[in-house]
Amino acid sequence: MTNGVAAKNLKYVSLIVLIAQTTALVLILRYSRTQKHEGPRYLSSTAVVMAEIVKLVTCILVLFYNHGWRWTSFLGEINAEVIQKRRETLKVAVPAVLYVIQNNLLFLALSKLDAATYQVTYQLKILTTAFFSVTMLGRSLNRLKWLALILLTGGVALVQMPAGGAAKSAGSGNTSDGNTSDSIVGLLAVLAACFSSGFAGVYFEKILKTTNVSLWMRNLQLAFFSIFGGFLMCWLYDYEAIQKDGFLQGYNTIIWIVVMLQAYGGLVIALVVKYADNILKGFAVSLSIILSSFASWFLLGDFTPSLMFAAGATIVIVSTFMYGYESKTVKPPHTAHTFDRTSKEDVAKEPLHAV
């Protein structure tokens, strides 16, 4: 009974921390854009790599501490959980590989679609996450919950919709020329990214909930593989810039705060996935988008809420209450064969990826 209460408390605490972390991250990123900066700006691809390195080092230190700072004991766990269970370890590489694929698909989609179409279609990752939660984890969602998820998708799309002419200027311009083939390629790319995001998130959730490996060890494994994926992204998209101005070009105190927030945000996400689920994570991130926008309006003055934003924010809040409404009904007995915790979960990467 005590363990159940502790797990429930961890679920809500982790969700609150995730909302706070994501809101803070968005605010600091926006603040960094308002700063006058001489010389080259930092590369987001290198920030992702540095965040994964920070996460890896943190996990190593925590595991080392758990073993009483005994090196032999720590290496013994690494050998038992990583070396001796190579097949289980390689399973964690799947989300990292999907992260790289997802980012490449998103780059392709951004080059083919205008910003409005991209933002709207990319929110379908909320529904793909729910789909994989049902098919892979056996989670049960009634009609009200599906309706709430559909409303959440639409609400987030409205909140994220670029204002005014930004929708057209943000794209590559191909769609304005009526290039139907480019539009189809872009849509297929973003849809594939949505399925990649949903599958990777639920797959990692299944790993966390079906094994007895500690959360820190799983995060260590995920960070290890993600570092390689991050370096690949650096090589694919920013090789010349890194060669010219260095890997840490443009880094200052604010950027290092961003890196730390991304790193520890990744650890919080794993906690949410472990004790809640990916659908709940999606709701938490959606609420943080609204909170960060309002905070940006009050604190930075770089955002002006529109009628569309207000409508989207209202829909997101209503959908959140709709999804949690069933918690007032009598729940069926828990069985060991289901992952249904009357929660929900999301994705990424964007491990991994905060976009």
Image: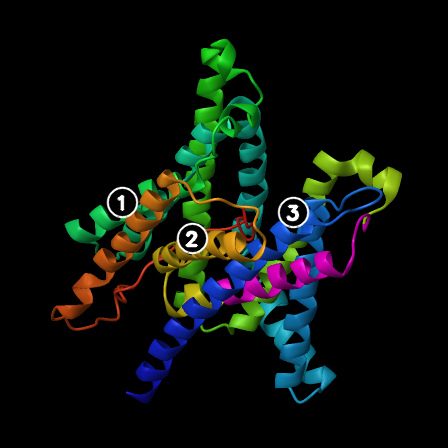
Amino acid type for the residue under numbered disc 1: Leu
Frontmost residue, 85 versus 93? 93
Secondary structure of the residue carrying numbered label 1: helix
Q: Which residue is mark 3?
A: 229
Q: Quadrant of the N terminus?
A: bottom left
Q: Which mark is residue 6?
A: none
Graded by Cα atoms within 10 Å as few (under 14), some (14 to 19) or many (20 or more), the crowding at tag 3 reads many
Give the percent coordinates (x, y) of residue 351. Answer: 54, 53
Frontmost residue, 144 versus 334? 144
Q: Quadrant of the C terminus?
A: top right
Q: Does the stretch in magenta take in 292?
A: no
Q: Residue at 67% of width from left, 73% of height from top? A: 60
Amino acid type for the residue under numbered disc 3: Gly
* Colour style of the rendered protein structure: rainbow
Kindly indicate the quadrant of the structure image that contains residue 242.
top right
Secondary structure of the residue carrying numbered label 2: helix
Q: CA distance from mark 3 to mark 2?
A: 30 Å
Q: Which mark is residue 151?
A: 1
Kindly indicate the quadrant of the structure image that contains residue 288.
bottom left
Q: Residue at 30% of width from left, 55% of height from top? A: 317
Give the percent coordinates (x, y) of residue 14. Answer: 44, 71
Q: Which mark is residue 290?
A: 2
Give the percent coordinates (x, y) of residue 98. Answer: 53, 44
Magenta residues (range): 248-270
Frontmost residue, 228 versus 78? 228
Relative height, residue 192 to residue 227 (above, below): above
Amino acid type for the residue under numbered disc 2: Ile
Give the percent coordinates (x, y) of residue 259. Answer: 67, 59
Mark 1 or 2, nearer chain start: 1
